């Protein structure tokens, strides 16, 4: 692994231990873009660097964790077309700090105050810009930041034109 400089990144492990990264590095693969290969070396871990799903998503990659012991695959932005037989069981999003959040609830998500079968809603009635962005992100199918920026730059997402 090619070391590229010092790192001030701190990582909290699943067990709550805080590890200080010693340096940055490039992962030794040419199948990913340079941005997706960026890593932080953690001396307290074995192996000393972890592949970041957040970094992959930020660089336009889709990571799929397959059931049971069938592994994980990483796909380029134009290399994958997903089709679903049923709606997703859970939906999540990334919060401001970069952590993914998936609300775990037993009841289906519903909007309070809707008694009938029909309802007309307006995204501008939401209480904050954060809620509007969250709604639009969900309506678009939870695309990555890179996908949204790409679509905007290519003028294929007219909703967000500057």
Image (cartoon, rainbow, N blue to C red):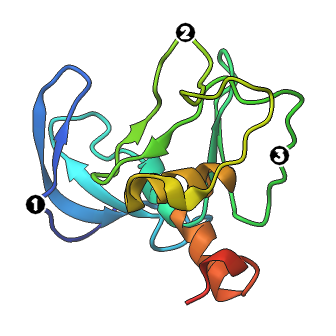
The dot on residue 82 is 3
Residue drawn at (51%, 55%) of the image:
125
Which residue occupies 17% across, 61% down? Answer: 23
Q: Secondary structure at mark 1?
A: loop
Q: Nearer the viewer, mark 2 or mark 3?
A: 2
Q: To which quarter of the image does residue 40 belong?
A: bottom left
Alpha-carbon neighbours of circle 2 within 10 Å: few (<14), some, or many (≥20)? Answer: few
Picture coordinates of residue 59, whole percent (x, y): 52, 67
Mark sitting earlier along the chain (3/1): 1
Give the SS element for disc 3: loop
Residue ID for mark 1: 8
Where residue 95 appears, x then y in whole percent?
Answer: 36, 48
Q: Where is residue 119, by image quadrant?
A: top right
Residue count near mark 1 (Cα–Cα under 10 Å), binned few <14, some 14–19, many ≥20: few
Where is 131 relative to 1, above or below? above
Residue at the image point whose x is 39% and y is 57% from the top: 130
């Amino acid at each position: 692994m090619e070391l590229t400089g010092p790192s001030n990144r701190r990582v909290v492990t699943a067990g709550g231990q805080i590890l200080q990264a010693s340096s940055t590095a490039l992962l030794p693969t040419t199948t990913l873009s340079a941005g997706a290969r960026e890593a932080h070396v953690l001396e307290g871990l074995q192996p000393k660097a972890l592949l970041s799903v957040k970094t992959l998503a930020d660089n336009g990659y889709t990571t799929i964790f397959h059931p049971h012991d069938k592994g994980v695959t990483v796909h380029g932005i134009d290399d994958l077309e997903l089709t679903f037989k049923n709606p997703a069981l859970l939906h999540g999003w990334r919060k401001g700090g970069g952590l993914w959040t998936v609300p775990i609830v037993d009841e289906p998500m519903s909007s309070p105050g809707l008694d009938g079968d029909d309802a007309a809603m307006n995204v501008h009635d939401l209480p904050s810009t954060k809620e509007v962005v969250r709604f639009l992100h969900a309506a678009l199918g939870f695309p990555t930041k890179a996908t949204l920026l790409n679509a905007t730059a290519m003028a294929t997402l007219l909703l967000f034109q500057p």
